[in-house]
Amino acid sequence: MTSRPGFIEGRRPTKDELRTFHGLTVDDLLPKKTNLLFVGINPGLWTAAVNAHFARPGNRFWPAMYRAGITSAEVDASCGLPDNVRSELERKGIGISNICPIATARADELSKQQLLDGGELLRTLVRKKKPNVVAVLGVTAYRQAFGNAKVSIGPSEEPFEGSELWILPNPSGLNAHETVDSLADWYGKAAKAAGVAPSR
């Protein structure tokens, strides 16, 4: 974990502490060679507090990653991303970023302009890292950030800054349309398209 003032290391943040992370940013997880880049909407307060993506208990990203065979073990990021998980993602070329880097309690707190600005930052990042696949986790946020109302869940016919684009369901517990199994199915398909070998 990057040492940064204010981040909470090695324990779960309290409710009072979480409020203090509103508006802060979270470090991207970017391996030297990126095969697959997962892109969330924006960091939650818990993620900002421990500087680990999808850290809030109840978020289904890490359970889906394990169910899909992308990670070799179940991941608990609630106190920060364990070093062995970070190393495995680095080795496989799996990165994690966000459309908008600004932490909020809920994604719907973001303004349209923040999503548009974040979309431009993401374009720059993808041009630099050149991942095989960009997997954006949230169809509504993608539509807002990039002005494409026709995009739907699944692989896109249009590339994204030279990378293959997949629009996938958001793993938040607020997304009642999806289960860990359905998320795992989509994430596994994107990983296969990116050339990421299953862990088991």
Image (tube, grey):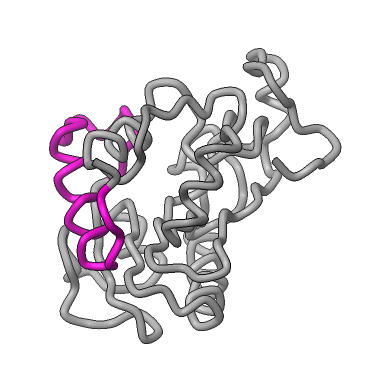
Where residue 175 sits, quadrant-wise, is top left
4 to the left or right of 116: right
Q: Picture coordinates of residue 111 (x, y %)?
A: 52, 54
Of residues 87 and 46, which is closer to you in this image?
87
Q: Picture coordinates of residue 104 (x, y %)?
A: 57, 39
Number of numbered markers? 0
Where residue 72 sits, quadrant-wise, is top left
Of residues 189 and 60, which is closer to you in this image?
189
Rendered-image quadrant of the N terminus: top right
Q: Residue furthest front?
A: 200
Magenta residues (range): 170-198
Q: Picture coordinates of residue 131 (x, y %)?
A: 41, 73
Where residue 135 sits, quadrant-wise, is bottom left
Residue beneath the point at 47% across and 25% down: 76
Residue beneath the point at 49% across and 61% down: 115
99 to the left or right of 60: right
Rendered-image quadrant of the C terminus: top left
Q: Picture coordinates of residue 63 (x, y %)?
A: 31, 30
Q: Is residue 50 above or below residue 14?
A: below
Q: Is residue 105 above or below residue 86?
A: above
32 to the left or right of 165: right
